[in-house]
Image: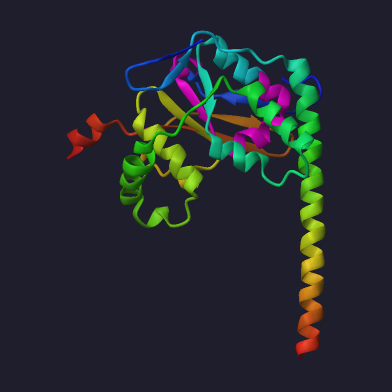
Amino acid sequence: MKKQVSDQLPVVKKQKLINIKEFSKLARRVKRIFMEEEERLEQEQSRYSYHQSRRAIRLT
Amino acid sequence: MSKNNPDIHIIKAEGLLGLLKNKHLLLDTSVFIDAFNHFEEFARFFNECKRGNVTIVTVSPVIAEFTKGVENTKKLSEKLSFVDSIIDIKLPISPDIINKYIPNLVSQYKAKGKSVSYVDFILAGLVDKYERDLVLLTKNPVDFPLSVFNLYSYFVIKMDRALQVYGIYQAKLKKQIKKKK
């Protein structure tokens, strides 16, 4: 499948086409994963800022 | 045009697919993120490229950027499958990218390089090395200044209330730089 050209950039003889139906299903799942990650990150950040503000109150 | 969302479609610059013919198109992280947000448009665009003998490629550091933060191996493998379904090959990063091309780019970028991520320097190094055969697709024009790269072509994603521009960047050919000097 793969061969090397003189400058070492690998090339393929035939590119694989994307199956749009399968790709759509996968994309929706990946989008959900990203949204969950964003949500988790936001929760962690708000927890962190809560602790920071509590700490600031204690110090003043 | 998307069946699900008729308001979204890709407007290609004139002659874009002809310019890309027989080239390698290097994808950065922003492309993978937008590809799951606008999957139909991107899948069609990639397939048009592939039919024109364009090889879609990326590198491991981009895949790491795209997959980082996953909770478990199942989700990791879904993200990896998504990348694999788009790309034709993963490009190796040869030692000369790190030892020769990136240091050379750091000196060309000058102060503009201060905020550029190492992943972007790797992409820039590859584009510089394979100046005739490899072009970069990115939504991030800040890290690929026109003092160092040529804007080879572009496309726009038109949405209901927004436009997003993707640049396709090519290294300034060494011959052109020598002529200027």
Of B172 and B100, which appears nearest the observer? B100
Of B158 and B120, which appears nearest the observer? B120
Colouring: rainbow
Write the residue at 62% across / 15% down.
B47
Question: Is residue B37 on the magenta stretch?
Answer: yes
Residue B148: x %, y % from top left: 35, 42
Q: Which residues are magenta?
A: B17-43
- Name the quarter where the N terminus of chain B is drawn: top right
Of A53 and A1, which appears nearest the observer? A1
Residue A14, above or below B77: above
Residue B65: x %, y % from top left: 61, 43
Residue B28 seen by the camera: no
Residue B13, above or below A14: below
Residue B96 seen by the camera: yes
Image-quadrant location for residue A45: bottom right
Q: How many marks?
A: 0
Question: Is residue B173 on the magenta stretch?
Answer: no
In the image: residue B40, left or right of residue A43: left
- Name the quarter where the C terminus of chain B is drawn: top left
Image-quadrant location for residue B30: top right
Residue B50: x %, y % from top left: 56, 14
Write the residue at 37% across / 22% down.
A8
Which residue reaches farthest bottom?
A60
In the image: residue B138, left or right of residue A47: left
Residue B54, above or below B151: above
Residue A13: x %, y % from top left: 49, 8
| Most frequent secondary structure within the magenta stretch | helix
